[in-house]
Image: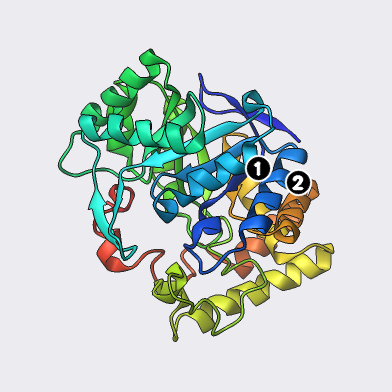
C-alpha cells in the first residue's frame, strides 16, 4: 500500500481510503457484522484512512467504527470526521450548523461515540451560510490547540472559501466528489487546492454505485436510499448514464479488469495529492477496489476513457437541485 501525506502538514494516509457512510443506512439496509468485517479487512490490507460523519445514521456510524476498532492499534488509524449536518427523528435533513459553540459540542459527542481521545481530521460537512468560515475554522483550530483534533479539513466548498479557511489555519485536505462523471473541481477548485498545498480526498469515485459496473435499473428504491431521489438515477437519466458505463466496460474488458477498477484508477492517476475514498460496504467490493491499485493506465487508455465518458457527459445533477443551491462548491 502506497502512502501519501495529506497537504503540507497532514498525516500520512493510504493511497485509498474507506468511506463508511453506506454502513449506516444511507444507501438502504446494511449488514452490521459484514460492515465490521469490511473495516477489519481494509485495515488488514493497509488502509488506514477511515472516513465518517457524526450525522451518518445519527451517530450509528461512529459507534460502528468504535466497535470495529476494539483491539486495534489506534495510532495506526487516521479518523476523518465531518460535522455540522442536522437531522430529525425521521432521518430527514434540517440544515447545517457550524457555529463555534456547536463545533465544540459536536466534537465532544464524536469523541465519546468513537471511544478515542482525539480525531485526526475534523471538517465541517458543508459551509454554513450564516457563519463565516473563519469562525468555524477558528473553532476547530482551538480544538487542535487543546489536543482534541490533529488536523483540519474542508468538505464541498469553493475556491474563495478554501482560501479564506487556509488563511486562518493550515488545511490538509478538501473532501469533495470527484469521478469520471463528476469533474467540476477541475476548473477552479483543484487548481486552488494545488496552489495552497491542499490534498483532495475524493468521494463518490464510483458515483454511488452508478459507474461501478454492478448497477441495475430499478435498484436503489429501498427506504432511506439516497439514490431513490438522486437525479442521475431517475428514469430518463439512468438509461443514458448506464450507456456511458457500458462504453467504459469495453475498455475494462479489454484490459481484463472491472469497470470499478478502471474508474477508481482514473481518479487515482490524477495526482499523488488525490486519494480516492471508496464506500465499500462488503468485503468483495473492497477486494475489487483494492485491485485498482495494480491498474496502470496508459496514454491510450486515457484517450479511450475520455472518448467513452467525456467530461459533462452524465445526465442529471450529482445532488437534487434543492441541495445543490446550498453547496458552496457549486457556486
Q: Residues within 10 Å of mark 2 (few under 14, many from 20)?
A: some
Q: Earlier in the sequence, mark 2 or mark 1?
A: 1
User: In screen coordinates, is 103 left or right of 118?
Assistant: left
Q: Is residue 82 above or below residue 90?
A: above
Residue denoted by label 2: 293
Q: Is residue 7 above or below residue 158?
A: above
Of residues 199 and 91, the one drawn nearer to the viewer in this rendering: 91
Which label is found at residue 241? none
Q: Residues within 10 Å of mark 1 (few under 14, many from 20)?
A: many
Badge 2 vs badge 1, beta-carbon distance below 8 Å? yes
Q: Is residue 56 above or below residue 127?
A: below
Front: mark 2 or 1 = 1
Is residue 270 among what the camera can see? Answer: no
Residue denoted by label 1: 16
Q: CA distance from mark 2 to mark 1?
A: 8 Å
Quadrant of the image occupied by residue 231? bottom left
Q: Position of residue 40 (x, y in %)?
A: 71, 44
Q: Report the residue at 68% width, 59% height from top.
A: 282
Q: Secondary structure at mark 1?
A: loop
User: In screen coordinates, is 209 left or right of 61?
Assistant: right
Q: If the image is split into quadrants, where does the N terminus sit?
A: top right
Q: Report the residue at 58% width, 64% height from top.
A: 30
Is residue 88 among what the camera can see? Answer: yes
User: In screen coordinates, is 220 left or right of 103?
Assistant: right
Q: Position of residue 127 (x, y in %)?
A: 27, 43
Q: Report the residue at 58% width, 54% height from top.
A: 279
Q: Is residue 227 above or below residue 327?
A: below
User: In screen coordinates, is 44 left or right of 310?
Assistant: right
Q: Report the residue at 48% width, 55% height from top.
A: 183
Circle count? 2
Q: Position of residue 74 (x, y in %)?
A: 62, 27
Amino acid at each position: 500500500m502506497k502512502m501519501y501525506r495529506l497537504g503540507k502538514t497532514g498525516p500520512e494516509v493510504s493511497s485509498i481510503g474507506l468511506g463508511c457512510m453506506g454502513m449506516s443506512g444511507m444507501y438502504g439496509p446494511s449488514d452490521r457484522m459484514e460492515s465490521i468485517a469490511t473495516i477489519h479487512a481494509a485495515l488488514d490490507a493497509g488502509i488506514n484512512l477511515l472516513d465518517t460523519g457524526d450525522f451518518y445514521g445519527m451517530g450509528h456510524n461512529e459507534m460502528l467504527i468504535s466497535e470495529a476498532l476494539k483491539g486495534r492499534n489506534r495510532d495506526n488509524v487516521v479518523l476523518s470526521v465531518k460535522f455540522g449536518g442536522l437531522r430529525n427523528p425521521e432521518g430527514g435533513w434540517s440544515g447545517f450548523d457550524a457555529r463555534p459553540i456547536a463545533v465544540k459540542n459536536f466534537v465532544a459527542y464524536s469523541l465519546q461515540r468513537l471511544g478515542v481521545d482525539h480525531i485526526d481530521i475534523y471538517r465541517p460537512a458543508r459551509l454554513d451560510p450564516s457563519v463565516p468560515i473563519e469562525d468555524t475554522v477558528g473553532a476547530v483550530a482551538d480544538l487542535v490547540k487543546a489536543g482534541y483534533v490533529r488536523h483540519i479539513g474542508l468538505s464541498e466548498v469553493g475556491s474563495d472559501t478554501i482560501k479564506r479557511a487556509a488563511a486562518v489555519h493550515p488545511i490538509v485536505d478538501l473532501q469533495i466528489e470527484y469521478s469520471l462523471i463528476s469533474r467540476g473541481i477541475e476548473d477552479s477548485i483543484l487548481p486552488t487546492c494545488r496552489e495552497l498545498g491542499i490534498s483532495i480526498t475524493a468521494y463518490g469515485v464510483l458515483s454511488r454505485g452508478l459507474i461501478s459496473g454492478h448497477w441495475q435499473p430499478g435498484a436503489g428504491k429501498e427506504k432511506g436510499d439516497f439514490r431513490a431521489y438522486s437525479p442521475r438515477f431517475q428514469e430518463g437519466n439512468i438509461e443514458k448514464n448506464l450507456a456511458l458505463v457500458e462504453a467504459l466496460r469495453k475498455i475494462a474488458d479489454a484490459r481484463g479488469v472491472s469497470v470499478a477498477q478502471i474508474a477508481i484508477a482514473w481518479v487515482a492517476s490524477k495526482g499523488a495529492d488525490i486519494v480516492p475514498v471508496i464506500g465499500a460496504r462488503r468485503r468483495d467490493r473492497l477486494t475489487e477496489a483494492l485491485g485498482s491499485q495494480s491498474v496502470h493506465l496508459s496514454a491510450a487508455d486515457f484517450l479511450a476513457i475520455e472518448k467513452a465518458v467525456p467530461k459533462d457527459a452524465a445526465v442529471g445533477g450529482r445532488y437534487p437541485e434543492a441541495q445543490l443551491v446550498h453547496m458552496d462548491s457549486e457556486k
